[in-house]
Image (tube, rainbow, N blue to C red):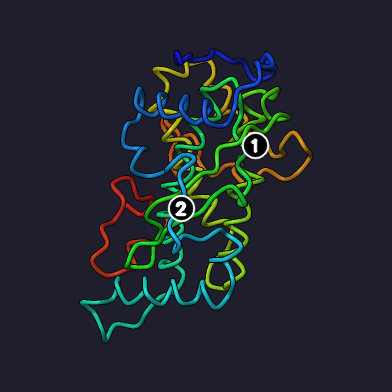
Amino acid sequence: MAYHSFQIADDLIWRAPLYRPSSELAEALREAFTTHRAHFHDIIRLNETPPDAAMTLEQWAHPTRLASLMAIYSDHIYRNHLTQPREAKPLVSLWAQWYLGLLAPPLMLALLTQPQAIAVTPSHIHVEFHETGRAACFWLNVQEDHLASALSARERIEKLVTECLQPVVKALEATGDINARLIWSNTGYLINWCLGEWKGFLGEETVNALREACFFEKQLRNGQDNPLYRTVVLREGLLVRRTCCQRYRLPDVQQCGDCTLK
């Protein structure tokens, strides 16, 4: 099936597409990944049977399971510094960056390039964890969200935020080791970076409208507070991260190239 990019203003309602089976929608997404970001094929598997070890958010977010994953990840991060005191906040921050950094971009690309919108609720997603305890690969049960197919680009991204990303953030905040604002700060930086990288096929008008909605509107269209609000800010004509992600506090982890502390 041919791949189409869409120039979409903020309030544009997408034309309702003809019904397409999930297998055809999955194939269209594979073509989109191949065209624009071929490495997404290694990050997210579409309509493939997940391995037995893969888990839904409901499964991995159980306190016992999540504590086990964090313990494994902590052992990996501090493996060469066994006597150093371990800091939970930067550890969870980096774990979340792996999880959301792998999951969000393919879903964003799918929602912003296809007439049919995919369902992004956690029940449609399984994750396989690396031996070090962090996310490694995702399996997506590709189904159309018929209501979302009629939404604008802004509303689709907001649906991704509220239905897919927010449950992850809440699960991690429930550990008591990190606050949601830090995870959203990292996620806002990620979303802004993706939009900048994809301007060539999304179009400048769409990217500018999405940046305005994501980072400068206090509320989402549904009236909920916007968790991405001012997670990136304008400095010297550029949108940059507002706060440090704290990863520099971990041993053998490089500081971000554009760290706010520099």
Q: Is residue 217 left or right of residue 68?
A: right
Q: Amino acid at mark 1?
A: Glu
Give x and y (percent) for residue 34. 34, 26
Q: Which quadrant of the figure has residue 173? A: bottom right
Give x and y (percent) for residue 41. 36, 38
Give x and y (percent) for residue 31. 40, 24
Q: Is residue 19 above or below residue 91?
A: above
Q: Is residue 242 left or right of residue 148?
A: left
Dot label at residue 158:
1
Q: Residues within 10 Å of mark 1 (few under 14, many from 20)?
A: many
Q: Is residue 226 left or right of residue 238?
A: right
Q: Residue furthest right?
A: 223
Dot label at residue 50:
2
- Answer whether labels 2 and 1 touch (C-beta < 8 Å): no
Q: Residue at x 46, y 53 (%)?
A: 50
Q: Nearer the viewer, residue 150 or 211?
A: 150
Dot label at residue 134:
none
Q: Which secondary structure lies at badge 1?
A: helix
Q: Which secondary structure lies at badge 2?
A: loop
Q: Residues within 10 Å of mark 2 (few under 14, many from 20)?
A: some
